[in-house]
Amino acid sequence: KENGPVDSSSQKEDHQNFKNLSWQKALDRACRDPFDETAKLSGLDQVETMITELHSSLSIDSKLKKDMIRITRHIRNGDILLNDPTRCFLREGDLVKRSNRS
């Protein structure tokens, strides 16, 4: 793969995509009037909710990663499976090869 110049316009678009998300629009509405105390409190509540959800998500990700490491220890060269962060296992158990013979 050739390393060419980075397209800064597409990078800028990627970094600005959050502005179209519903949580950002709601936060912008809440913070529109700097003198509206109720809106400020609403904005803070939204931020607190997002932080709580992020913490919960990170905890789940951490547990899944630990489970993946534990499971791959049972597979020869299983550490290769950890190279793909999107990979997950549906269940744990013995592998059974079935024959297609009638």
Image (cartoon, helix red, strand yellow):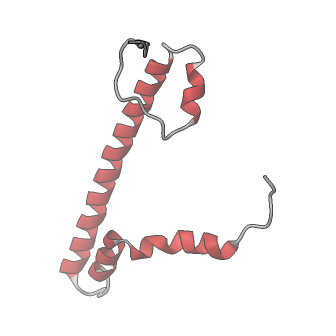
Looking at the image, residue 11 lies above or below residue 65 = below
Residue found at x 55% / y 69%:
14
56 to the left or right of 65? left
Residue 45 drawn at (x, y percent): 23, 65
* Quadrant housing residue 7: bottom right
Quarter of the picture containing the C terminus is: top left
* Quadrant housing residue 6: bottom right
Looking at the image, residue 25 lies above or below residue 14 = below
Nearest the viewer among 87 and 65 is 87
Which residue is at the far front? 102
9 to the left or right of 44? right
58 to the left or right of 74? left
36 to the left or right of 31? left
Nearest the viewer among 86 and 9 is 86
Residue 31 drawn at (x, y percent): 31, 80
Residue found at x 55% / y 30%:
82
* Quadrant housing residue 78: top right
Residue 34 drawn at (x, y percent): 31, 85
Looking at the image, residue 21 lies above or below residue 48 = below
Residue 61 drawn at (x, y percent): 40, 39
Give the total number of marks visible in the rendering.
Answer: 0
Residue found at x 28% / y 59%:
48
